[in-house]
Image: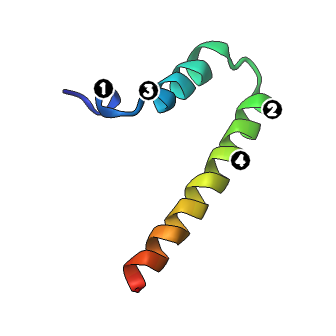
Amino acid sequence: MNMFEQLPKSVKKTLRYIKQDVHSIEKLEAIQKILNIYINRRKEQLQKQKNL
């Protein structure tokens, strides 16, 4: 089983959307910015939990 198959359905849909429907750098950069914000927030939460 490859890594893609193990991902949640919502992540797979996002990746497929990026691959098939994003046709501009601006749109791709906007998606990247949003994803990075949420990933960084979750990282901080997990690090705080680990340090408790």
CA–CA distance in space, label 3 to label 4: 21 Å
Determine which residue is flagged by label 1.
Answer: 5
Element under label 2? helix
Mark 3 crowdedness (10 Å alpha carbons): few <14, some 14-19, many ≥20: few
Q: In which quadrant will I find the C terminus?
A: bottom left
- Quickly name the residue at label 4: 33
| Circles 4 and 1: CB atoms closer than 8 Å | no
- Residue at figure coordinates x 66%, y 42% from the top left: 32
Instruction: Tell me the number on the disc at residue 9.
Output: 3
Where residue 47 appears, as percent x and y from the top left, is 45, 75
The quadrant of the rendering that contains the N terminus is: top left
Mark 3 or 2, closer to the camera? 3
Q: Which picture quadrant has residue 17?
A: top right
Q: Distance between the residues labelled 3 and 2?
A: 25 Å
The residue pinned by badge 2 equals: 26
Give the percent coordinates (x, y) of residue 12: 46, 26
Drawn side of residue 24 relative to residue 5, left or right? right
* Foreground label between 4 and 2: 4
C-alpha distance separating marks 2 and 1: 28 Å
Q: 25 or 11, which is in the foreground?
A: 11
Tell me which label, 3 or 2, sits earlier in the chain: 3
Q: Are dots 3 and 2 in contact, CB under 8 Å?
A: no
- The percent coordinates of residue 20 (x first, y second) are 59, 13
